[in-house]
Image: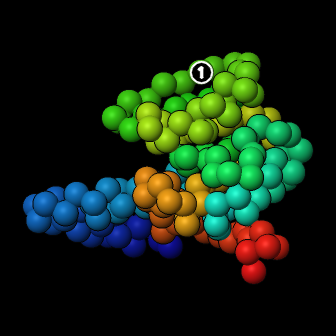
Amino acid sequence: MTERSRQELLYKTGALYEQLIENQDEKRAAKLASVVKKAADEEIYIAFTGHYSAGKSSLLNCLLMENILPTSPIPTSANLVVIRNGEKRVRLHTTDGACAELEGAYHKDKVQQYCKDGEQIETVEIFDRYTEIEPGVAYIDTPGIDSTDEAHFLSAASILHQADALFYVVHYNHV
């Protein structure tokens, strides 16, 4: 894509965003803004989704060779968890729009509690020196899409439109 065509696309996207806001379609405007941000960051999203307790978090723990994500036979993940390569830290995005960052060493137990707290925390971002994750790539763990908690479904669905690759994880008993 040339710089000129990129500028034209940004201009048209901005105009579409303004039109969505004028029409009071905040939901689609927010989705459009998230796609634009992802494109600007030039990041690749690899999302793991599927039914609750299918093993999404377990699979990610295995890929990372670290038990950072909580696992359980009952629905456990209550929010989006984004895992990136980088300086060790955890960033929390709350349901009321606030953001907090915990730099340096963190306790896995505490991080796992954040991952289970869908009431107050919308997204947990975990950064560490994961040699298994290339720079510019993010692994995303989602709650089960068939959870009886509607907030879990909405959380999972909120990121799927941005995924560059999607792994739909199923438990052998669910097939």
Question: In x, y percent, where is residue 103?
Answer: 63, 20
For the residue pair 123 and 170, the one nearer the viewer reads as 170
Task: Confirm whether residue 80 shows in the render.
Answer: yes
Question: In x, y percent, where is residue 21?
Answer: 16, 59
What residue do we see at 59% from left, 21% from top? Answer: 102
In the rendered image, which residue does mark 1 sit on?
102
For the residue pair 61 and 19, the one nearer the viewer reads as 61
Query: Relative to 25, does residue 78 appear above or below in the rendering?
Result: above
Tell me the crowding category of disc 1: few under 14, some 14 to 19, or many 20 or more residues within 10 angstroms, Cα based.
few
Question: In x, y percent, where is residue 114?
Answer: 59, 32
Query: Relative to 17, does residue 67 appear above or below in the rendering?
Result: above
Residue farthest bottom in this picture: 175
What residue do we see at 73% from left, 68% from top? Answer: 169
- Tell me the element at label 1: strand
What colour scheme was applied to this rendering of the protein? rainbow
What residue do we see at 55% from left, 65% from top? Answer: 145
